[in-house]
Amino acid sequence: MVRQVVTRSQRRMEKKQALIVLVLVLAVALASFSLGVMVGRGGSQPVVTVEPVATPRIAVPAEPLIPAATEVADPLPSPPEGGDGLTFYEALPRGEQPPMGSGINLPPEEAPVATVDTPALRVAPPLPAPQPLPQPAPSRSRPEDDGEGAYLVQVASFRQAADAASLAERLAFKKYPAYAQEVDLGAKGVWHRVFVGPYSGNEEVTRIVQRLQTEDKLTALIRKR
């Protein structure tokens, strides 16, 4: 027979393969052991049994029964001698208030209505009618030439007849014999003059002129009729 010669390199390879196989076997065994330990811990948990604690019972002595006292109803008091002896229903017409809980309720008393006395309205007396203001004396027209009084006093001359009439009324209110007169001056037009008079004496007309100039601030001119 021919014997096969194993070289060193082949031996080394066989040793390596055997070593690798051994390591794998150990790894598989270690993994299986670890897995078994974990499964054993998760599946078999220790069961703790708790024994019930007995609660002590306290004995309460029974109370002795007390016999109920028998109440004896008091006899009804007899009505007083010499009284009227009215019953409950006979006392109602007298206006006595029935006791509470008797089932008979009188109608509530009506409260008196308070009346308020309203004072009589005072009617104010009617106001007196206003007194009419004294109207100034209307301006009189030129007096007729009766031969008495030779002097007139001219106090103003206006274009408008209303202005002349207003001044104549104001002087007449002061007791002057005043009047307005229309005068045609031709080219100058129609004017309205205001006169006071007539007066007969020179002293009288002079006094009127001074009064008109002093009190009424008018320019007075003496004219003959």
Image (cartoon, rainbow, N blue to C red):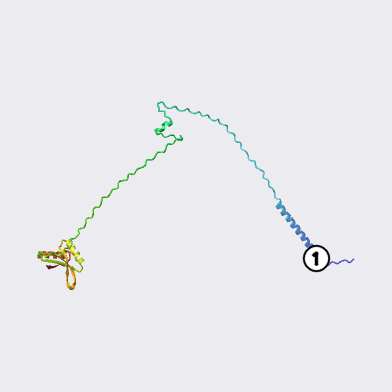
Q: Classify 183 as above or below 39.
A: below
Residue under the image location 76 percent in, 58 percent down: 28
Residue that sits furthest to the top in the current view: 81
- Return the x and y of residue 42 as percentages of the image width and height: 70, 52
- Return the x and y of residue 129 as percentages of the image width and height: 23, 54
- Return the x and y of residue 174 as percentages of the image width and height: 17, 61
Q: Is residue 49 left or right of residue 166?
A: right
Residue that sits furthest to the right in the current view: 1
Residue under the image location 76 percent in, 60 percent down: 24
For label 1, the residue is 13
Number of disc labels: 1
Residue under the image location 19 percent in, 65 percent down: 165
Between 130 and 79, which is closer to the camera in this rendering?
130
- Dot 1 alpha-carbon crowd within 10 angstroms: few under 14, some 14 to 19, many 20 or more: few
The quarter of the picture where residue 167 lies is bottom left
- Return the x and y of residue 8 as percentages of the image width and height: 82, 67
Label 1 SS: helix
Q: Is residue 129 left or right of residue 76?
A: left
Q: Amino acid at mark 1?
A: Met
* Quadrant showing the C terminus: bottom left
Q: Is residue 193 left or right of residue 113?
A: left
The quarter of the picture where residue 148 lies is bottom left
* Quadrant showing the N terminus: bottom right
Between 61 and 152, which is closer to the camera in this rendering?
152
Q: Classify 209 as above or below 43.
A: below
Between 211 and 150, which is closer to the camera in this rendering?
150
The quarter of the picture where residue 163 lies is bottom left
